[in-house]
Image: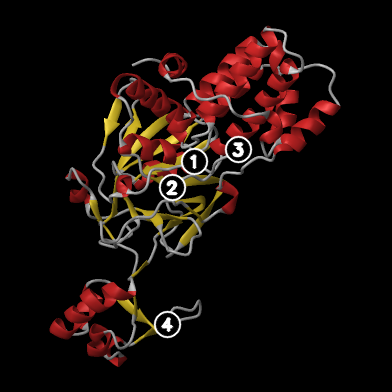
């Protein structure tokens, strides 16, 4: 496989030239760019042929990221540069301003949410679309404009590798597959650096990533197709040892109540369950015989049932929560046999971990061992660690190859991601 830069450069040679119809003044960035150059005596782009080449290459391949106007902008830049070379009055200034405008629009597009419907449980993790002033200031500060363009185009190592593969597909096979387009769109929303947990729902695996490198991975169990694990981003702030399992209301009705009706309330004690008076923080444990279990089974009333910590608890020894309204979290599990399955879609939406203590050790920097048998023993992490639940039916491997996963939730069959037009 070609490297990212080589593959994209090769693709630009085969992209048909678009009509050069765009002027700097016609773009929504015109006022910001005009103000920027009013205070400058020297151009930025015209002094860096490498930066010009990087920008036009990025624009020509931008439809891979859903930014359809890129090729037209690239063609307009090339026409303005040709006019400047021919001595056309004002053409050099037009080319310079057009390149700045195009880069603003491209930088904004690469941070646009796109078609991936991600729930940002921690709003700080949502991609921030830069303002024209912020992009221009970054250009002015940069001592290597070409490198700035490349960083903007690549976004993060996963996205960069997928984009190189998509460019190669486009060169030899035509349009990239829906799986490639969907995975590229979702990968674009991942961080460019730092330390974070990545759960790939499509392949049912978790990766621990540090500065763009996968340092460890494990299998996970995700939601059934009818109870999908959502695409979500949040921040892990604590590890909870000896957790209770709060049985979802629907499972209390469909599973717990029928067993109590058949076997009596003694079944609850045998399975280490207890019943509480409600869902509020000061709910108390109540006598299960006081509950109308037939009404629970019928769905006429709700029952709060939880399983106490210990052997057989569905949460296992620990869980990793991040605040979110859907009650999604990562957790240990006693059902070890599920990790032998090729397709691990058995949960009700939460993520079950093949080796929770190993994840805990990576997050905590020490062995993840409870200090006592106290239920719901919370241990704060030194710093919050982002967790991204995404869906990559195509993903790059460390050896440069691509791995493919079945589209278990049918997310690649939706509308192709396209970003807003610039005019």
Q: Which residue is mark 2?
A: 116
Residue 189 numbered mark, or none: 1
Q: Are marks 1 and 2 in contact (CB under 8 Å)?
A: yes
Whole-number angstrom distance, CA of label 3 to CA of label 4:
47 Å
Residue 332's place in the image compared with 267, above or below, is above
Camera sees residue 366: no
Q: Is residue 313 above or below residue 157?
A: below
Secondary-structure class at tag 4? loop
Q: Is residue 98 left or right of residue 246?
A: right
Sequence-wise first label, 2 or 4: 2
Q: Residue at x 43, y 63 (%)?
A: 326
Q: Is residue 130 above or below residue 103?
A: below
The crowd level at tag 4 (other Cα within 10 Å; few <14, some 14-19, many 20+) is some
Q: CA distance from mark 1 to mark 2?
A: 9 Å
Front-most of residues 115 and 378: 115
- Front residue of this view, candidates 365 and 27: 27
Give residue 16's quadrant in the image: top left
Q: Circle 3: is it few (<14), some (14-19), or many (20+) Cα within 10 Å?
A: some
**Which is more N-terminal, label 3 or label 1?**
3
* Residue ID for mark 4: 278
């Amino acid at each position: 496989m070609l490297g990212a830069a080589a593959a994209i450069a090769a693709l630009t040679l085969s992209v048909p030239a678009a009509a050069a119809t765009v002027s700097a003044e016609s773009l929504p960035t015109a006022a910001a760019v005009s103000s920027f150059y009013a205070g400058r005596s020297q151009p930025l782009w015209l002094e860096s042929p490498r930066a010009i080449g990087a920008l036009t290459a990025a624009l020509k391949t931008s439809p891979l990221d859903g930014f359809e106007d890129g090729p037209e902008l690239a063609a307009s830049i090339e026409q303005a540069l040709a006019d400047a070379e021919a001595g056309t009055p004002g053409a050099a200034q037009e080319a310079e301003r057009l390149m700045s405008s195009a880069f603003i629009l491209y930088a904004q597009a690469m941070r646009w949410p796109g078609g991936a419907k991600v729930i940002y449980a921690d709003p700080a993790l949502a991609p921030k679309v830069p303002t024209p002033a912020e992009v221009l200031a970054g250009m002015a500060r940069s001592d290597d404009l070409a490198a700035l363009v490349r960083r903007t185009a690549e976004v993060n190592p996963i996205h960069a590798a997928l984009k190189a593969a998509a460019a190669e597909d486009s060169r030899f096979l035509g349009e990239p597959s829906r799986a490639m387009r969907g995975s590229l769109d979702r990968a674009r929303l991942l961080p460019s650096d730092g330390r974070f947990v990545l759960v790939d729902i499509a392949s049912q695996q978790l990766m621990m990533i540090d500065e763009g490198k996968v340092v460890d991975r494990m299998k996970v169990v995700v939601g059934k197709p009818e109870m999908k694990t959502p695409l979500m981003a949040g921040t892990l702030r604590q590890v909870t040892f000896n957790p209770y399992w709060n049985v979802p209301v629907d499972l209390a009705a469909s599973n717990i109540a029928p067993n109590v009706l058949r076997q009596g309330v003694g079944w609850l004690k045998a399975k280490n369950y207890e019943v509480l008076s409600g869902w509020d923080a000061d709910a108390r444990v109540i006598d299960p015989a006081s509950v109308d279990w037939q009404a629970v089974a019928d769905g006429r009333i709700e029952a709060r049932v939880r399983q106490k910590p210990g052997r057989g608890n569905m949460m296992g020894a620990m869980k990793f929560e991040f605040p979110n309204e859907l009650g999604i979290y990562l957790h240990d599990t006693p059902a070890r046999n599920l990790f032998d399955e090729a397709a691990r879609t058995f949960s009700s939406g939460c993520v079950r971990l093949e080796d929770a203590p190993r994840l805990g050790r990576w997050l905590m920097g020490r062995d993840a061992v409870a200090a006592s048998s106290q239920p719901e023993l919370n241990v704060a992490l030194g710093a919050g660690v982002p967790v991204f639940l995404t869906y990559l039916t195509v993903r790059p491997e460390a050896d440069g190859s691509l791995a493919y996963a079945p589209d278990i939730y049918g997310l690649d069959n939706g509308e192709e991601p396209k970003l807003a037009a610039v005019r």
